[in-house]
Image (tube, rainbow, N blue to C red):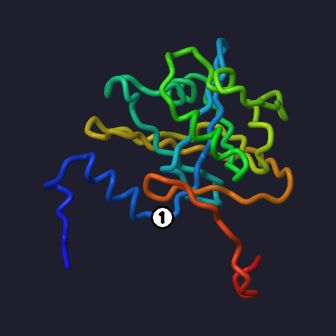
């Protein structure tokens, strides 16, 4: 048996322990935009937290190039108060993974990696074409403290897109996994 004191280990060790043991975690493939470009980025510190009001939480870290530099997704949501949160189907997992690469501010991952987008509502950023589920959201609030390396963003679901059946991808440690539906009748909705 081992007990690990999180106050006595480095943040990278804490991250590895958390991301390797809180599994599976759904992947939010977030589309944001401003008046200059569209940004597309994956986040696995993501979950639903409330149905009244309908809220999602995504934790957005600092840019890998500098701890004081917020990610483009962070900047865009703060500026526009809107984000489209796509759930990743298995067939787009490889493309989604590529969009985790750090690009210079203003360079679109959708353009760089040739990912098609589709505008389904003029009031929100587009969805990733081929995604079967997406939440069109507005910024409800954030929780920020100086010592936090990641900032939780609370996003209110305004609309939901359903484009058919899908097999979602989840983050498991350093890799990804397929999620399957259980066959037991009592677990079905």
Q: Residue at x 21, y 58 (%)?
A: 6
Q: Where residue 69 sits: x, y (%)? A: 38, 23
Front-most of 46 and 80? Answer: 46
Does 56 appear above or below 183? above
Q: Residue at x 62, y 31 (%)?
A: 40
**Which residue corresponds to mark 1?**
23
Q: Quadrant of the C terminus?
A: bottom right
Residue 19 in the figure: left or right of residue 145: right
Residue 84 in the figure: left or right of residue 100: right
Q: Residue at x 76, y 87 (%)?
A: 185
Q: Where residue 122 sits: x, y (%)? A: 82, 27
Front-most of 132 and 156? Answer: 132
Residue 170 in the figure: left or right of residue 165: left
Q: Where residue 171 sits: x, y (%)? A: 52, 55
Does 137 appear above or below 55? above
Does 22 appear above or below 143? below
Image-quadrant location for residue 7: bottom left
Query: Tag 1's secondary structure?
Result: loop
Does 162 appear above or below 146? below
Q: Where residue 28 sits: x, y (%)? A: 60, 46
């Amino acid at each position: 048996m081992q007990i690990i004191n999180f106050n006595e280990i480095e943040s990278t060790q804490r991250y590895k322990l958390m991301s390797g043991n809180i599994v599976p975690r759904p992947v939010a493939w977030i589309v944001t935009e401003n008046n200059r470009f569209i940004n597309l980025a994956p986040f696995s510190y993501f979950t639903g937290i409330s149905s009244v009001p309908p809220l999602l939480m995504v934790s957005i870290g600092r840019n890998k190039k500098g701890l004081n530099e917020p990610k483009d997704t962070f900047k865009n949501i703060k500026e526009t108060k809107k984000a489209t949160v796509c759930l990743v189907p298995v067939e787009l997992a490889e493309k989604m993974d590529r969009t985790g690469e750090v690009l210079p501010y203003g360079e679109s991952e959708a353009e760089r990696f040739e990912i098609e987008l589709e505008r389904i509502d003029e009031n929100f950023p587009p969805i990733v074409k081929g995604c079967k589920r997406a939440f069109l959201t507005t910024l409800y609030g954030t929780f920020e403290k100086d010592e936090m390396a990641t900032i939780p963003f609370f996003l209110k679901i305004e609309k939901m897109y359903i484009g058919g059946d899908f097999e979602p991808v989840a983050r498991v440690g350093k890799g990804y996994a397929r999620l399957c539906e259980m066959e037991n009748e009592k677990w079905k909705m």
